Image (cartoon, rainbow, N blue to C red):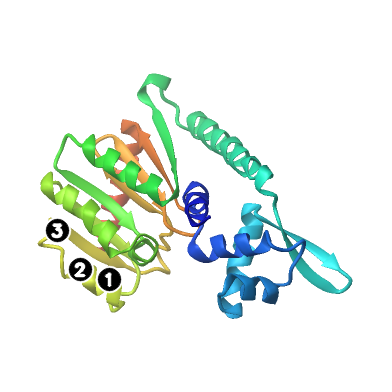
Amino acid sequence: MQDQLEKLKKVFSLNNYETKLYWAALKFEAATLSELARKAKIPRTAAYSHIQSLIEKGFLLVIKIGKRKKYQALSPKQLHHILERKMVTLKEITDDLAKRINVPEQKLAISYYSGIEGVQIASDTWLENAKTKFGKSFENVESTVMQHGQKQIAKSIDKRVNKKIKGRLIVSGHPEAPILKSVLKKDEKELRKSIVVSPNAYPIKASIAVLDDMVFIFTSEEDPFAVLIKNQDVADSVNSIHDMVWDRYNP
């Protein structure tokens, strides 16, 4: 059963708590927050936000029994509907992007990658297609480290360094944050120049990187995904925005 739960976690990009809570909910016809937390063996205070996430993702339904709010698990036989909804959303996104970017179809390629593993595949693809040796990026480092872990990020950096691709990084955050200080002190070793910008002026949520004619966009929040856009006009626009922010902090 543990193997099945791990597969479920990977396919739907669930975190450990979400997986445990959904599995716990399957044991009940309907259960309160306390009952789910107890069955999942996680702290009640930690369960609430993950239950809300499961509701948003469609894994839990909210029902009222009298004055009590309870939660009911979506039947495993209906889980495929969640993937079908994602595919519909993806088609809407790609169709909208294609309409907004006024270029011939053969000059535009958009690929979507789901989950943490998908983000890693997109990152590898982005680097493997590099022709030049210089890239620029905006990144929410703290969020990326928390979701992917230091080891996984180090692997991606090592691949870039091994290809001798230099980077210019704009990080939104507070310079004294331990994670950011750790990143900045490795700049020279990791062939990178970095600046930290105000999260109020530049509240970067998703990370965006550009190399040659390919833009790599990914988010590491509750539902990680990545998008690769291969188009010179889009890449040039991201480069220009990056230069404007960089020049503001490096007059």
- Residue designated by label 1: 180
Q: Residue drawn 25% across and 49% down?
A: 136
Between circles 2 and 3, the one closer to the viewer is: 3
Q: Are marks 2 and 1 in contact (CB under 8 Å)?
A: yes
Q: Whole-percent x and y of residue 13?
A: 49, 52
Instruction: Kindly state the secondary structure of the residue where label 3 is placed.
Output: loop
Considering the numbered disc 2 on the image, is that residue within a helix, a strand or a loop? Answer: helix
Mark 3 to mark 1: distance in Å? Answer: 14 Å
The three-letter amino acid code for the residue at tag 2 is Leu
**Circle 3 is placed at which residue position?**
190
Marks 3,1: beta carbons within 8 A: no
Q: Amino acid at mark 1?
A: Leu
Residue 98 seen from this side: yes
Label 2 vs label 3: CA separation?
Answer: 10 Å
Disc 3 residue crowd, few under 14, some 14–19, many 20+, Cα 10 Å? many
- Tell me where residue 219 appears, x and y as whole percent: 43, 53
From the top left corner, tell me how far across and down residue 216 is, in percent: 34, 44
Which secondary structure lies at badge 1?
helix
Return the residue nearer the eye: 233 or 16: 16
Looking at the image, residue 21 lies above or below residue 240? below
Q: Residue at x 56, y 75 (%)?
A: 46
Which residue lies under the disc numbered 2?
184
Question: Gap in Å between the C-alphas at discs 2 and 1?
Answer: 6 Å
Q: Residue furthest front?
A: 1
> Which residue sits at x=28%, y=77%?
178
User: Looking at the image, is mark 3 or mark 1 earlier in the sequence?
Assistant: 1
Q: Earlier in the sequence, mark 2 or mark 3?
A: 2
Residue 20 position, x and y percent, is: 56, 64
Classify 14 as above or below 240: below
> Which residue in the rendered view is the most extreme toward the right?
66
